[in-house]
Amino acid sequence: MKVIITEHARKRLRDMRQEKITIGDIVSAANAIPGKIPTATRFRGFFAKSGRIFDLVAKDIPGRRLVITIIGK
């Protein structure tokens, strides 16, 4: 499924709390979520290649998965 990352989520990647989390990490995490996501939902416990743990908020729109924000731990 195609993954779209909002401008808000991209902006958050520049924050210190989300450092070392890449776009590739986000796309991999979003694609790893099974099933349909009809409403914005927080998914916890993803690992970036750097070892950093993060959560993401995503929802499905027709034919795509929208990543709304990223929360670094």
Image: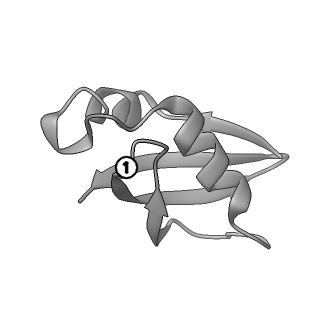
Q: In the image, is residue 42 above or below residue 18? A: below
For this rendering, which residue is in front, 38 or 28? Answer: 28
Q: Quadrant of residue 58?
A: bottom right
Residue in view at x 53 percent, y 47 percent: 67
Residue 15 appears in which quarter of the rendering? top left
Q: Position of residue 3 (x, y in %)?
A: 69, 40
Residue 56, placed above or below residue 69: below
Point out residue 12 in the picture as x, y percentages from the top left corner.
27, 35
Q: Compare residues 31 and 21 and report the one nearer the observer.
A: 21
Number of callouts: 1
Lateral position of residue 19 relative to residue 48, left or right: left
Type of colouring: one colour
Check disc 1 and report its element: helix, strand or loop.
Answer: strand
In the displayed structure, would residue 36 be above or below residue 48? Answer: below
Residue nearest the viewer, comparing 46 with 56: 46
> 47 left or right of 4?
left
Q: Is residue 42 left or right of residue 20?
A: right
In this image, 55 relative to 13: left or right?
A: right
Which image quarter is the C terminus in?
Answer: bottom left
Amino acid found under the numbered disc labelled 1: Ile
Q: Residue at x 34, y 52 (%)?
A: 52
Q: Residue at x 72, y 53 (%)?
A: 31
Q: Position of residue 68 (x, y in %)?
A: 46, 47
Q: Residues within 10 Å of mark 1 (few under 14, many from 20)?
A: many
From the top left corner, tell me how far across and down residue 26 is, in percent. Answer: 54, 43
Q: Nearer the viewer, residue 55 or 51?
A: 51
According to the image, label 1 marks what residue? 70
